[in-house]
Image (tube, grey):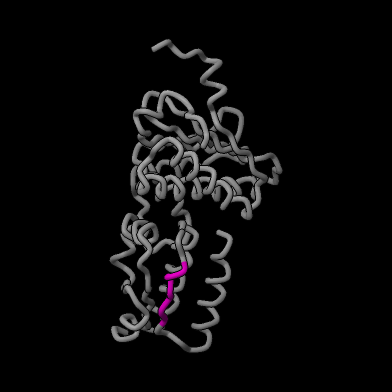
Amino acid sequence: MASRTDQQAEVEQLRLAIPPDPTYIAMTRMFAGSVARHYGCEEDVVEDVKVAVSEACTNSVKAHHDSGTTDPIELRARAVNGELIFEIIDWGKGIDHALQASVEEGVATPAAGLYEGSLGLTLIRALFPGAEIARNEERGTTVRFAVPASSDRSEGLPPLG
Amino acid sequence: MFTAPKLRERLVETVDQGRYKIIVNLQGVSFMDSTGLGTLVGGLKRVKEHEGTLSLVCSSRPVLRVLSITGLNNVFPIHETVEQAVAAS
């Protein structure tokens, strides 16, 4: 098989940008679920992707609200080496280091403490233990996680229909 | 995130009316995220202050998975039907 160029990879990255408004979060779920199904993910994985994307976007909307930015929040998906990688990128103030550490250490569990808030990142990490949650260099936060894609579809975007 | 405030408002209202044995019917709910979970946890805290209970009626696989992965399936009594929940409460 011919090697793929960077240009091709860029073309096949799917993107959705939403205003920082909670009414658009359902749209990110639909987008992510459709992309995951399109790449042949199992239905249970599709549901997990929808939850993780929803959690990340909910946090991003709050982050934009808190920092007063109206820039769009971006959801990206691309297939690489048998995996479908999702990224949620915001331009808020950036994740708090202490919260990031507690999530990575698995300290915050809802059942243990009956927390009412801040469950989103914990849930993402519970669904996808390899999920990366990091401050962007400039500003904002990026959440990234990968799911296995169907082997016959992970080499590129299959045609619609 | 979008519908959770309505649930929170209803739970607060119910507790304020002196009803401390609450059954939340999630049969029409196909998706739940941490905002919804947090709202249910908030409701549970409020009824527990009055030695009450909050149980769930749910058979949606995605919702049950979220409850399970967070360990909240061990915190809330979960039933398949409203009738079963009423009988147990």
When asked about the image quadrant of residue A84, the answer is top left
Residue A97 spot, x, y in % from top left: 48, 40
**Number of marks drawn:** 0
Q: Is residue A150 above or below residue A34?
A: above
Identify the residue at image location x=48%, y=28%: A157
Q: Is residue A153 above or below residue B85?
A: above
Give whichever of A106, B57 is nearer the camera.
Answer: B57
Residue B23 sits inside the magenta stretch: yes
Identify the residue at image location x=34%, y=49%: A107
Residue A29 shown left or right of residue B62 in the figure: right
Identify the residue at image location x=40%, y=48%: A48
Residue A112 makes an appearance in the image = no
Residue B68 spot, x, y in % from top left: 31, 59
Residue A152 spot, x, y in % from top left: 36, 28
Q: Is residue A149 above or below residue B73?
A: above
Residue A75 shown left or right of residue B72 in the figure: right
Q: Quadrant of the N terminus of chain A?
A: top left
Residue ranking furthest to the top: A2
Identify the residue at image location x=29%, y=83%: B88
The span shown in magenta is B22-28
Give whichever of B1, B86 is nearer the camera.
Answer: B86
Residue B70 makes an appearance in the image = yes
Residue ranking furthest to the front: A161
Give whichever of A69, A152 is nearer the camera.
Answer: A152
Residue B12 sits inside the magenta stretch: no
Residue A132 spot, x, y in % from top left: 42, 35
